[in-house]
Amino acid sequence: MNPIQERRQGKVYTPQHVVDLMVEKLFKLRDPKPSDLVLDPGCGYGAFVEGILRWCKRKRVVPPEILGLEKDSRLLAETKESLGDKGKVKLLEQDFLLEESIPRADFVIGNPPYVRLERLSVSERKIYRSRFKTAFNRFDLYILFFEKALKSLTSSGRLVFITPEKFEYTLSSGPLRRFMATNYHVEEIHHIEEDAFKSLVTYPTITTINRGIKGLTRVVLRDSSSFITRLPSDGSPWTPQIRGKNEVLEFDATLEDVCERISCGVATGKDEVFVVPQSQVTDELRLFAYPTVRGEQLTFRGIKSEDVILVPYDEKGCLLPESQLGIFLNYLIRYKDVLASRYCVRRGKREWYAFHENPPMKDMLKPKILCKDIAKEPRFLLDEKGELIPRHSVYYAIPKNAEMLPVLLNFLNSSQVKEWLEANCQRAANGFLRLQSSVLKRIPIPKHITEKVTETQQRLE
């Protein structure tokens, strides 16, 4: 199996130095007894089995019982052959998530598979949702591994997993965070080097959890700094605590409260057809052309775009019939095969020349605040005239009244909001922040700004 195939199936080989670090954490201040059971719920190539045996040999400790589970029969056969006869090691062909007779383990260690919801069949999703409380929203399989592995621990057991850091903050991981912090002691969260898995960027995190007395959590960041914190147990994101930044703003409202709309821009499914340089627009097409902007065109110096988007919708966002498109229809017909091949059309729910979703034209053509969906540093820019149609890599916010745009823009570009976003946003590759509407809506708005909103509304009334 080549590396690409392994990634598609959620299998990622764990480097030896990471394995050794995790085994040290597993047995920290507590050597395993010969009668203890160590479980690897997705043993793959047996990296953790070998790591445990290396540790025992180095420490001159009698190895515990080791149980490795793997549902891939071919991979399991290779692992058995490579490990040979290791005495107290038992390797079984089992699907950990669906196997009902999992023994209680004193220790659990592993690198569970990372498999997003989109790669699961409808029947698989249904089964997992019926069996796991953490199978919520757009869950990933490693979240379910956390739940079942923790439930498999003995009363004083310990778990060490390496996973992407996303469970610390995504909406889908809320039930898992609540489950962890309510029922277990999250002893340590250790963010290791980003390139630990070489070309695969997952922002790897080693999490150590104990079953027993709850307490504070030690956090180790990628710059090797560390501190102690207390994680919330209500399912809310852990990022403010984990990144060493508590809520920096006192507020009585959020950005969602003072805006009538916060959303990402238009997704056409074929920008190379609908988006053209303004200089190439004929007089006949100008009726359907609107200035547009994508994320890369939002810079610290301002908005740089000379493109327009050709929109087959009326001012209310309703798709125009072909009979009303005029010369625009002739243009679109040249690309009919390409447009018809888009997924949104093939599934039979959209006209061949429609966008992925009907654009809210009435809202988008208002004065608004814009920002990139992915940025090294968040930067908010103003579309004062309300003439730009943002594309899918741009988020936009429309205040409840346009008079608040300048003061709201200044606040969103403040150091306070920058720190808040750094503590609450997901990470993309190379440390970039991923700004999403769900996060933008939660930006705390201070009282002095909400008071101005109220004053302005009252004056207008």
Image: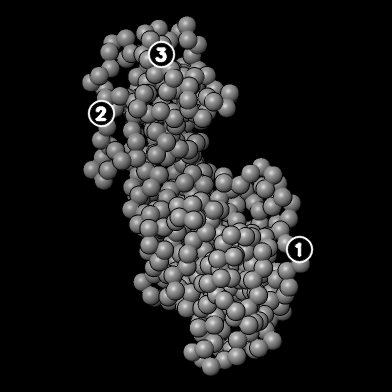
Q: Do the residues labelled 1 and 3 touch (CB within 8 Å)?
A: no
Label 3 crowding class (10 Å Cα cut-off): few <14, some 14-19, many 20+? few
* Nearest to the observer: residue 111 or residue 171: 111
Q: Which corner quadrant of the image does residue 66 belong to?
A: bottom right
User: Does dot 1 land on a helix, a strand or a loop?
Assistant: loop
Residue 122: numbered disc: none
Task: Depth check: give the residue in front, 301 or 431.
Answer: 431
- Vertical placement of 89 versus 141: above or below? below
From this view, report whether residue 325 is shown above or below residue 349. above
Residue holding disc 3: 333
Task: Please name the residue shown 67% across and 48% down the image.
Answer: 124
- Viewer can see residue 339: yes
Label 1 vs label 3: CA separation? 56 Å
User: Crowding near pointer 2: few (<14 within 10 Å), some, many (20+)?
Assistant: few
Which SS class for mark 3?
helix
Q: Where is residue 153 in the image (x, y as percent from the top left)?
A: 69, 74
Gap in Å between the C-alphas at discs 3 and 2?
25 Å
Give, as a three-letter code, the residue at label 3.
Ile
Vertical position of residue 391 compared to residue 79: above or below: above
Q: Where is residue 459 in the image (x, y as percent from the top left)?
A: 47, 34
Among the 4 quarters of the image, the one containing residue 274? top left
- Left or right, 248 with reference to 88: left
Separation of disc 1 and disc 2 at Cα? 60 Å
Q: Earlier in the sequence, mark 3 or mark 2?
A: 2
Task: Give residue 42's quadrant in the image.
Answer: bottom right
Residue 85 in picture, x, y percent from top left: 60, 79
The amino acid pointed to by label 1 is Glu
Residue marked by disc 1: 100
Residue that label 2 marks: 306
- Counting residues from the start of the chain, the first of labels 1 and 3 encountered is 1
Question: Disc 1, disc 2: CB below 8 Å?
Answer: no
The answer to whether residue 425 is visible is no
